[in-house]
Image (cartoon, rainbow, N blue to C red):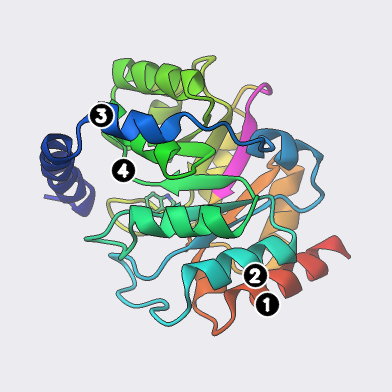
């Protein structure tokens, strides 16, 4: 069994347990407040740099990335660096994240926040909203067309932007629908961990113009971004390259400055 199948099995159990502990109406009570927030898709369209910086303590492919910095510190650093958005990993078992991380990032900054999670159930969307997310990720590799449709519609109803992630042509074809805002191409194959930005280049022409194109994973230099901009990409999701340093905010700042030149 590949890692993605394992993650999804664990996630199913986790969500079923949580639903019994915290009923959805209880979560919904925290959703009532409306916070003014810029849409990530809009920001990416007008930005020269388009960086979405991620908070990521560890991953199945790199066991330890950074266990030292606090999420509030990272959020403030990223925000001061001028990122368009911040991605917060909330999976605990495989990525060492939590919903508390999302909440603390929310309390620290006004930057659009993406809940980076393996979403398989509507319950997780209410959770995302209740913990301050502005954007949710849907992963085509673990969802069928019907699920993508139901989940993205509910996300829109909750006022959340939707980033849909694909890593091949088949996933892209099955997923295109008007309830998505951004199309992310993951350069890392989540089944094999192989990384190549050729994946983003290959799929770019197949993504209709109405979706903002985001290239995800394995980006650690300015050059590949410049190349990908030529292919129409306006968003770049970067985790490890910033998080592996002692001061992720400072690293993001220097990276963005260099990209602006
Ligand atoms: O750390 P990187 O290589 O810069 O990658 C960031 C991000 O793209 C990656 O964490 C990611 C992309 N899609 C995901 C889905 C689930 C978990 C994690 C991810």
Q: Which residue is mark 1?
A: 250
Is the residue indicated by label 4 positioned so its CB lies within 8 Å of ligand 1? yes
How far separated are the C-alphas under marks 4 and 2?
Answer: 26 Å
Residue 226 horizontal side relative to residue 33, left or right: right
Based on the picture, tell me whether residue 32 belongs to the magenta stretch. no
**Residue drawn at (65%, 46%) of the image:** 235
Q: Which residue is mark 3?
A: 24
Q: Which residue is mark 2?
A: 77
Q: Is residue 234 shown above or below 120?
A: below
Q: State the SS at label 3.
A: helix
Mark 2 surroundings within 10 Å by alpha-carbon count, few (fewer than 14), some (14 through 19), many (20 or more): many
Q: Give the extent of the magenta segment.
A: 209-215
The x, y position of residue 86, in whole percent, is 57, 54
Mark toward the start of the polypeptide (4 vs 3)? 3
Ligand 1 in which quarter: bottom left
Query: Are the two marked residues, 4 and 2, in contact with CB atoms closer than 8 angstroms?
Result: no
Query: Are the two marked residues, 2 and 1, in contact with CB atoms closer than 8 angstroms?
Result: yes
Badge number at residue 201: none
**Residue drawn at (26%, 59%) of the image:** 92
How far separated are the C-alphas under marks 3 and 1?
Answer: 39 Å
Q: Which residue is mark 4?
A: 118
Residue 184 horizontal side relative to residue 49, left or right: left
């Amino acid at each position: 069994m590949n890692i993605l199948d394992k993650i999804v099995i664990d996630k199913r159990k986790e969500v079923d347990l949580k639903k019994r502990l915290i009923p959805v109406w209880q979560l919904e009570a925290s959703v009532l407040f409306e916070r003014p927030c810029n849409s990530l898709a809009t920001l990416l369209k007008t930005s020269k740099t388009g960086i979405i910086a991620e908070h990521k303590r560890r991953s199945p492919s790199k066991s330890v990335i950074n266990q030292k910095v606090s999420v509030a510190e990272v959020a403030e650093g990223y925000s001061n660096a001028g990122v368009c958005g911040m991605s917060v990993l909330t999976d605990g078992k495989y990525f060492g994240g939590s919903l508390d991380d999302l909440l603390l990032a929310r309390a620290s900054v006004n930057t659009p926040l993406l809940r980076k999670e393996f979403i398989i159930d509507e319950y997780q969307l209410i959770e995302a909203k209740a913990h301050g997310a502005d954007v949710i990720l849907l992963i085509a590799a673990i969802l069928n067309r019907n699920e993508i449709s139901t989940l993205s519609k509910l996300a829109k109803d909750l006022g959340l932007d939707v980033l849909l992630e694909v890593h091949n042509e088949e996933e892209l074809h099955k997923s295109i629908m008007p309830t998505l805002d951004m199309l992310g191409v993951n350069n890392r194959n989540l089944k094999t961990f192989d990384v190549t930005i050729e994946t983003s280049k290959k799929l770019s022409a197949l993504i209709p113009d109405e979706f903002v194109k985001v290239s995800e994973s394995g980006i650690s230099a300015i050059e590949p971004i410049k190349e990908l901009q030529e292919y129409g990409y306006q968003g770049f999701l970067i985790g490890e390259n910033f998080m592996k340093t002692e001061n992720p905010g400072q690293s993001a700042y220097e990276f963005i400055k260099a990209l602006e030149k």
